[in-house]
Image (cartoon, rainbow, N blue to C red):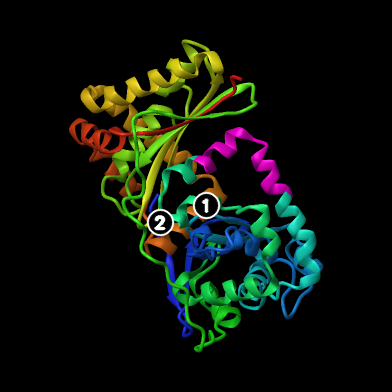
């Protein structure tokens, strides 16, 4: 359970981190501390489009060469964008680690975003945007962000919109990559059966090219606070859907908040993983009003928020929301019994242990922690933080989080 990892900073300023494990496959990736909140104001969705088109050509490779480089040895390459970061990563056989490192270095440092490849990929992203709009259980999260956040960098959807997508040109993609793919925002990370010596050799061989000194790195403006104006009444949007969709949430702890363990424990207790969570038992098992109810927490270094989502038939949406709010109020007013808290701590730690055995999840968690915090938390350290939560501290955290939830409802009634 002890995570012994190795780090090195190259002469060009690039940070590199290795998590050695016993495995016949190796995961390699670049974390970029730049996401949709770094989009130019006039081009929302640019970071996401860069993520899609980074595979379309470099000064050394055509798109078909990039597609096949890992596939021909049984591996794969993938990427994703959030509001705060972008990750490009591979998985492949242990013996092909040099292939993966060289390929990723080429993509991050030498992507050319060729014009002939942009139009087909623009169509792919346009379809992704429209598919998202056609899925109310997804769309409600974007609309919640737009209504909740005052700060425009957090309010706009990660995917952007089709009008912005049509305005994006090769020069925009090149400029974005030049300004954000910089050593102060980058981390290269590897997980697998690789020795520290071999790891450093590969990093120096393929990733040590100097960064242009004349480029001005992109900087972030401070968030516009307060982030949201919240009133007590739900915001209702009438939609032509069979289900009513409800999403409520509010500000939470940041990525390094010392109370984040209590926050995670609360959201797990309410509607995390498992059939025995409070809201799943009340809304699905006892009443049959919802198909699913889920809670999530999003944490960045400078801001965080929590959300609870459920879909139900229209006739029960208001009643289900009332029960959710009653449960939140109970957690704010009544401390959990000690034996109940112990049981939820045990379940939360068990889930973390199971999660740690999932290779891709562990790899991505390692990269994110090293990118944003510069260190990797062991399971023992996480368990200690969970064990330090008391009934009183849990209730205080509930009061801080749940006092004024912001609620959005997609109501299917005509």
Q: How many marks?
A: 2
| Residue drawn at the location 81% of the way across and 70% of the way down | 116
Residue 24 appears in the picture as rendered = yes
Q: Earlier in the sequence, mark 2 or mark 1?
A: 2
Marks 2, 1: nearer the viewer: 1
Q: Name the image quarter holding the C terminus.
A: top right
Crowding near pointer 2: few (<14 within 10 Å), some, many (20+)? some
What is the CA distance from the residue labelled 2 to the residue labelled 1? Answer: 37 Å
Q: Is residue 192 visible to us here?
A: no
Residue 364, position in %: x, y? 52, 54
> Does 225 sit above or below residue 409?
below
Q: Secondary structure at mark 1?
A: loop
Q: Is residue 63 left or right of residue 268?
A: right
Q: Give the image location of residue 377, x and y in percent.
A: 36, 54
Q: Is residue 137 magenta?
A: yes
Q: Main secondary structure of the magenta part?
A: helix
Left or right: 181, with 402 as reference point: right
**Residue 366 at what x, y percent from top left?**
46, 57
Report the magenta residues as a range. 127-143
Which of the pair 37/285 is nearer the observer? Answer: 37
**Picture quarter containing residue 395?**
top left
- Residue 370 figure quarter: bottom left
Q: Nearer the viewer, residue 372 or 132?
A: 132
- In the figure, 395 relative to 59: above or below? above
What mark, if any, has residue 360 been given in the picture? Answer: none
Residue drawn 65% across and 42% down?
Answer: 132
Residue occupied by mark 2: 3
Query: What residue do we see at 39% from left, 19% from top?
Result: 322
Numbered circle sitting on residue 156: 1
Q: Secondary structure at mark 2?
A: loop
């Amino acid at each position: 359970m002890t995570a012994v990892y190795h780090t090195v900073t190259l002469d060009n300023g690039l940070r590199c981190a290795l998590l050695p494990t016993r495995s016949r496959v190796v995961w390699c990736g670049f974390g970029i501390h730049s996401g949709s909140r770094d989009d130019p104001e006039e081009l929302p969705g640019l970071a996401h489009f860069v993520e899609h088109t980074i595979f379309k050509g470099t000064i050394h490779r055509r798109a078909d060469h990039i597609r096949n480089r890992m596939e021909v040895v049984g591996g794969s390459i993938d990427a994703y964008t959030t509001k705060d970061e972008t990750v490009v990563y591979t998985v492949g056989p242990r013996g092909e680690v040099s292939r993966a490192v060289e390929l990723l270095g080429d993509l991050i440092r030498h992507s050319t975003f060729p014009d002939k490849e942009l139009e087909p990929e623009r169509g792919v992203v346009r379809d992704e945007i429209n598919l998202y709009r056609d899925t109310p259980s997804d769309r409600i999260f974007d609309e919640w962000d737009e209504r909740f956040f005052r700060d425009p960098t957090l309010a706009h959807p990660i995917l952007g919109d089709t009008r912005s997508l049509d305005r994006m040109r090769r020069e925009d993609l090149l400029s974005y990559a030049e300004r954000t793919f910089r050593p102060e925002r980058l981390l290269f990370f590897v997980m697998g059966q690789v020795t520290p010596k071999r790891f450093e050799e590969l990093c120096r061989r393929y990733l040590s090219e100097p960064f242009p000194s004349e480029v001005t790195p992109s900087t972030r403006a401070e968030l516009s606070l307060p982030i949201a104006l919240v009133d007590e009444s739900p915001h209702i949007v009438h939609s032509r859907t069979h289900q009513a969709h409800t999403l409520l949430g509010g500000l939470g702890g940041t990525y390094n908040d010392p109370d984040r363990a209590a926050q995670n424990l609360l959201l797990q207790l309410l509607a995390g993983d498992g059939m025995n969570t409070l809201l799943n038992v009340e809304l699905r098992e006892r009443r049959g009003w919802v198909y699913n109810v889920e809670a999530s927490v999003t944490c960045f270094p400078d801001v965080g928020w929590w959300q609870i989502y459920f879909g139900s038939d229209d006739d029960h949406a208001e009643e289900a929301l009332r029960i959710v709010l009653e449960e939140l109020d109970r957690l704010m007013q009544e401390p959990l019994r000690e034996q109940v808290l112990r049981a939820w701590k045990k379940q939360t730690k068990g889930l973390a242990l199971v999660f740690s055995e999932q290779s891709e999840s562990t790899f991505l968690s390692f990269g994110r922690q090293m990118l944003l915090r510069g260190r990797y938390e062991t399971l023992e350290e996480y368990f200690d933080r969970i064990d330090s939560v008391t009934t009183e501290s849990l209730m205080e955290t509930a009061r801080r989080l749940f006092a004024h939830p912001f609620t959005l409802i997609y109501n299917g009634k005509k």
